[in-house]
Image (cartoon, coloured by chain):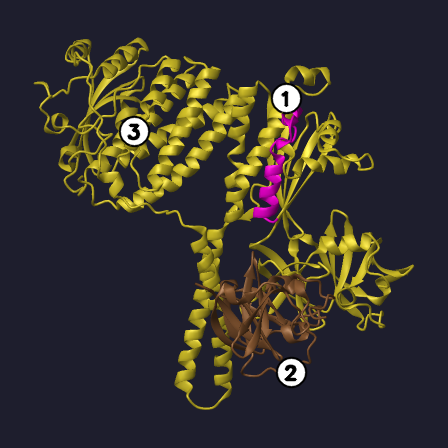
Amino acid sequence: MGEKYVVFRVGEGHYSIPLGEVSQIMRYENVRDVPTTPSFVDGVINVGGDVVPIVNLRTRFSLESTEVSRKNRIIIVQKQDIRYGVLVDSVREILDLDQDSVAAEAASVFGMKPEFVRGIAKIQDYLLVLLDIFKVLSASPDIPIKE
Amino acid sequence: MSFTGLDDKKLLRAFLEESEELVEKLNDNLLQLEKEAGNADSINEVFRLTHSLKSESALLGFTHLSELAHRLEDVFDSIRAETLTLSRPLMDAIFSAADLIHEIISRISIGQIDAQIETRTVIEELAQLAGLEPGAEPEEPSEASSTGNDVSDSGQVPLKPFQRSQIIEARERGEKIYMLHIRVSEEAEIKYPRAYLVFNNLELITNVIQTSPIMTIPQEDRLYERLSILLSSELPAERITAACAVDLIEEPQLEALDQARIDELLSSSETGEQVTLRTSRSGRSARIESTSVRVDTNKLNEIWQLVGELTIYKAQLSQLHDRLSRQRGNESIKGEVERASDSLERITAEMQQAIMGTRMVPIAVLFNKFPRLVRDLSRKLGKNVELEIHGKDTEIDRTIVEVLSDPLTHIIRNSLDHGLEEPEERRQRNKAEAGRIAISAQQQGGKIVIEVSDDGRGLDVGKIRKKAGIAADVSDEEAVQYIFSPGFSTKEGVTDLSGRGVGMDVVATRIREDLKGEVEVRSESGSGTLIRILLPLTLTILHSLVISCAGYYYAIPVQDIKETVKVSAQNIGIEGASEYYDYEGQKVALLRLDSVLFGPTDENTPAAQENNGVVVEQRRGSVCLLVDELVEEEDLVIKPISDLLNHRRLFSGVTVLGDGRIIFILDTARIIEIIETGGFDGI
């Protein structure tokens, strides 16, 4: 049995994080602007009384920013007490991934730095990057995620 | 049972509430007595407390608890009469009894009955040390007593040996023996409580030897139509009859017994010890549902989150209502929406308050157990210790209390065991023979600060350096922090430090990892050790002043604020690169909040003639913050803040109001620290 992954798109790439790390998937709504944050923090949303920062993965991956559309989703992940919202272009599917189909060597795909990648999987017509989302979120703001 | 007409649940609830307070008072007074054995106020207070506990628990049918309280009452009666002095072993037995009472009450509060706890050992120990006769087994309702089979021709129930000796003793004290008969009016639907009031009144001023029917366990209600009470007293007869002045009590008849009657009574007493097997009485007390339940804190958290979400939808609804009211027509619907929205708002606010209440507890719930801990330990170790406790009212999240209990206990234990010297050593060092331990709690700059200090020998830095292999260029202050490093106490030979720091690594791990707090130690050789614990406010309410700055909202904890002031251009001076505010002749650093948050602006002159200033004060110093507007004071629920929103660590938390406004809580201690260390360049 494989593990379930949430597959989402950012720019041209397909990325995924384990479903177990995801607490909620929301539409882009009620995002509030906050002062003095890194450029990739779009603002905050209120999730059950918690103030959750929204990290725009497009900006974080140094991609050109686009207008927010109906397709955009915020994936809420939680580590210890702190929840984060991850803004992605769209959520594509939830996938059962067999460990056998995952290549552990973190080859550089889409210019991702290897330390943020857990592995790569070949899915039918695309390459899937298994993201270490908490490393991405906790990396110092001036460290780029892509080379 | 026959007095079901009374609201059992209400009675039980009242009983539990009262007895909780009672147990606390009991402990306080006992501790006081231990310091000063002859303190008459405390002796009387303990007597009063045990007396009311005895009566109230009997009224609810908790006979074991009642008997235990009765024994304590007897002991303190003798102490009051100066026929008994408080010895140390007796004090210990009294404390055990107080503990047992506490235990029984907590069992009752979770729906158990008091008979499930063994009380006899403690009672016997008490009786033996106090030189009193052990009381009879709690009188269980038996066929015999309720059908009256044992009643002799004279209508007299035979005396038990204990009651017999009570009569003899009373005679020796020169008291008179009385028989009192009362009748409860037929108008009283339930007789027992009426009869009980009289019984209770008499108990307070006389020595009640026997009642028929028995009062300590409610019998069939109709039996209480007539009550006979055998008592001894030195009081005039009028005083005794006056005690019967209770509504619906009729024809009190008081008869002073002559020698012949007394002899008759004494001869009719039971010859053998009456042994009743105590069977656990299923029923009555267990049937009464308890008013408090234990709830998994995770469930509370869940409710808390849901209420949080509810507030958001409440805000949405009121916005919808605003929009609706700007449109024409649908007047009746508008009115209904408004009412619904208002009700929802009120209920949500109340719910929030209620849930908040379940989460926050005064730290007293934790601190209150330390006087006993310190007492017991100091007795065991033969050390004399004075304990000071400050800041008991500091409110703290329930979950923190639960995790904090063990580490804090360990720290105190360490102070007592290893920090404080033996009395002999203290004398040689010209220290007061009694060691001092102080525990305190307070909220400071968005954190809870808990300190435990002692005036003992301090940590042995040399040994710590040697054990941990600390380089010579590390200062002593830093070196002592090594007691918190993982694995320190398990290092070989560290037990030789005789515990100076043993287990502190475990304490630190719990505080740092489980509570996300900090712990530090300061120690001075020969004069003492201070352990400071800083806990984040994972979920804590702070009364705060909400202010605005450049279109965003911030809050400053009211406890950090010295004053809010109007700052005009004339009050502002310049010293070097910084501005200061002339605050009552004193120079206070002036900080424009917008520059702090968004970087220095060109415009340094206040735009308006009058600007809003908030003077905040911390241990390190004061600063006057210039803000745009003072908005309101609010009780804010502080949530932890992500580093992504706080990379300069200017905030101690964040919160969201019902209307969706995001508010950042300013960490004023950090802001002052940055100024002191020359941060905020060019401001």
In the image, farthest residue toward the bottom:
B328
Q: Which residue is mark 1?
A: B434
Q: Residue B678's image quarter?
A: bottom right
Measured Cα–Cα span from mark 1 to mark 2:
73 Å
| Residue B472, image x, y percentages | 82, 34
Chain letter matching colour brown: A
Vertical arrangement, residue A27 with respect to residue B78, above or below: below
- Please report the bounds of the magenta region as a residue range: B490-516
Chain letter matching colour yellow: B
Q: Chain under label 3?
A: B
Image point (60%, 49%), residue name = B516
State the residue in front, B439 or B255.
B439
Q: Which residue is mark 2?
A: A66
Amino acid residing under circle 3: His
Amino acid residing under circle 2: Thr
Q: Residue B453's image quarter?
A: top right
Question: Does residue B609 appear left or right of residue A102 in this picture?
Answer: right
Q: Quadrant of the N terminus of chain B?
A: top left
Vertical arrangement, residue B479 with respect to residue B463, above or below: below
Q: Which residue is mark 3?
A: B64
Measured Cα–Cα span from mark 2 to mark 3:
76 Å
Question: Does residue B290 appear left or right of residue B87 in this picture?
Answer: left
